[in-house]
Image (spheres, rainbow, N blue to C red):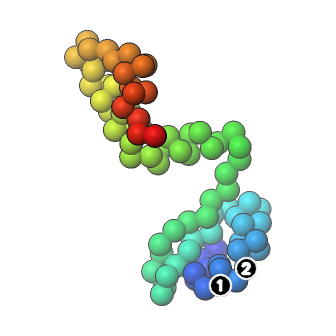
Amino acid sequence: MKMVGVRDLKNRLSHFLLEADREGAVIVTNHGVPCAAIVPLSPDELEDFIIARSPRIRKMARRGAAEIAASKFATLDKLLDEIPE
């Protein structure tokens, strides 16, 4: 797995984006400490990626699961009304 410092990434971003697409994840470091990762992502994977990493969506999913377990159900309109614009 490739590792790159922030400064080198800034100067050669296109190179590392292509490398992530071809070779897999590129780990970004800040003063030698890992701080981010560039990972390959296809258009088909975007929705799953966002859902898996969104604290707001995870919170809504946990709440929904709890309501299902307690036999309480929220309507779609109610859930959509709670999403900030």
Residue 37, quarter of the rendered image: bottom right
Look at mark 1 in the image and give the residue it sits on: 8
* Residue 25 spot, x, y in % from top left: 63, 63
Label 2, residues with CA under 10 Å away: few <14, some 14-19, many ≥20: few
Q: Closest to the observer: 43 or 75?
A: 75
Identified at 65% across, 79% down, the residue is 9
Residue 15, quarter of the rendered image: bottom right
Q: Which mark is residue 12?
A: 2
* Residue 38 spot, x, y in % from top left: 61, 64
**Looking at the picture, does residue 21 appear above or below residue 82?**
below
Identified at 48% across, 75% down, the residue is 34
CB within 8 Å, label 1 to label 2: yes
Residue 19 seen by the camera: no
**Looking at the picture, does residue 48 appear above or below residue 66?**
below
* Residue 76 spot, x, y in % from top left: 43, 19
The CA distance from mark 1 to mark 2 is 6 Å
Residue at far left of view: 70
Identified at 44% across, 46% down, the residue is 54
Residue at far top of view: 71
Judged left or right of residue 24, residue 70 is left
Three-letter code for the amino acid on which mark 2 is drawn:
Arg
Identified at 47% across, 48% down, the residue is 53
* Residue 39 spot, x, y in % from top left: 62, 59
Residue 69, quarter of the rendered image: top left
Quarter of the figure with the N terminus: bottom right
Q: Secondary structure at mark 2?
A: loop
Residue at far front of view: 85
Three-letter code for the amino acid on which mark 1 is drawn:
Asp
Q: Secondary structure at mark 1?
A: helix
Judged left or right of residue 22, residue 85 is left
